Amino acid sequence: KKAEWAALKDAKTLTADGKHFELAANIGAPKDVEGVNANGAEAVGLYRTEFLYMESDHFPTEDEQYAAYKAVLEGMNGKPVVVRTMDIGGDKTLPYFDLPEEMNPFLGWRALRISLTQGAGEEMFRTQLRALLRASVHGRLRIMFPMVALVTEFRAAKAIYEEEKAKLIADGVAVADGIEVGIMIEIPAAAVLADQFAKEVDFFSIGTNDLIQYSMASDRMNERVSYLYQPYNPSLLRLINHVVKSAHAEGKWAGMCGAMAGDQKAVPLLMGIGLDEFSMSATSVLETRSLMKRLDSTKMEELADKALTQAATMEEVLALVDDYTK
Ligand code: PEP
Ligand code: MG
């Protein structure tokens, strides 16, 4: 098996009937790029930049961030890199940043909500965007905002991005053309309204780790309610399907960077739904490429259709997956 996977390292990701899906990897630091390339990923689908902040004893400066982003873009050699702006809060804290104690940190002041708060939050965001824009000439950059609930939040973030971009260009700094700006879909309200978001964003990446916890009202860290953490539940599949179809209706692409994207039982369903990009831990890429190679995309569409229209429970969905992938 391992030998079969290794042989696929430099292969394109194609299904049995020749359909291409983009297989990408998630990273938390520039040093992870080596593993991404060693496992033959076609892109970085999620660079969680908060680790840059968490591993430092001060707010990373613009130059420190520029160096990290440049290293990742150069390391990927022209392949796409999705950089997510910082997602602090929730379970992630910073020793040098005074986050208020909250009753429900996962429902609180987190990620883009901090970035859009006037003062230190917005300054941090602007610094990060400038570092990203400067680094953009070193590869193929895609910028992604986390924890978007409202179209107006996206517009506010995009406006700040455009302001920083215009300032840099006015100062004579080189900025790449064609930087894509997209959002994570990890809040149910945004998933439901994906058809409207799709008119304004360049892409979606579905964050199932949070999307599942918020959809099921089930804390992703709480063992007692972990039975509710159900990637295969038809309700979640319907949300995902709506997001993907909404993106396609506007000519945009939809990916996934939550753990579900690398789950071998979920992949056949997501192929059938038509997800364009799958981003997972680097060590799952070759296994997934091998799985996709064995599966027929039109058969997976039939599987997804059944799961979306006929299944009531996760168990019924899993039985369908087993049926269709035997
Ligand atoms: C997610 O929510 O699925 C995701 C990829 O983001 P994180 O796990 O960093 O919250
Ligand atoms: Mg998340």
Image (cartoon, rainbow, N blue to C red):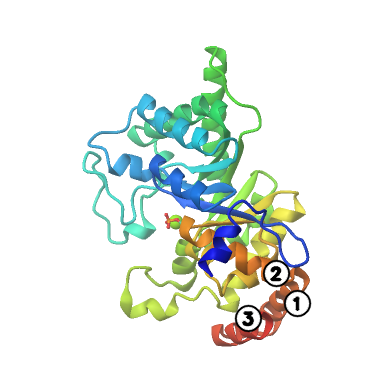
* Percent x, y of residue 93: 27, 49
Q: In the image, what residue type sits under mark 1?
A: Glu
Question: Regarding mark 3 in the picture, which secondary structure is present there?
Answer: helix
Q: Specify few, some or many for label 1: CA neighbours under 10 Å numbering under 14, 14-19, or 20 or more.
A: some
Q: In the image, what residue type sits under mark 3?
A: Val
Snapshot quadrant of residue 67: top left
Q: Residue 302 has which mark?
A: 1
Q: Residue 92 has which mark?
A: none
Of marks 2 and 1, which one's residue comes earlier in the chain? 2
Q: Specify few, some or many for label 3: CA neighbours under 10 Å numbering under 14, 14-19, or 20 or more.
A: many
Of marks 2 and 3, which one's residue comes earlier in the chain? 2
> Does the beta carbon at disc 1 come under 8 Å from ligand 1?
no
Question: Regarding mark 1 in the picture, which secondary structure is present there?
Answer: helix
Q: Residue furthest front?
A: 3
Of marks 3 and 1, which one's residue comes earlier in the chain? 1
> Which residue carries the number 2 mark?
272
Give how far apart the Cα atoms at labels 2 and 1 are: 7 Å
Snapshot quadrant of residue 52: top left
- The residue at the point 48 percent across, 31 percent down is 132
Q: How many numbered dots are placed on residues in this image?
A: 3
Give how far apart the Cα atoms at labels 2 and 3 are: 11 Å
Q: Residue 321 has which mark?
A: 3
* Percent x, y of residue 32: 41, 46
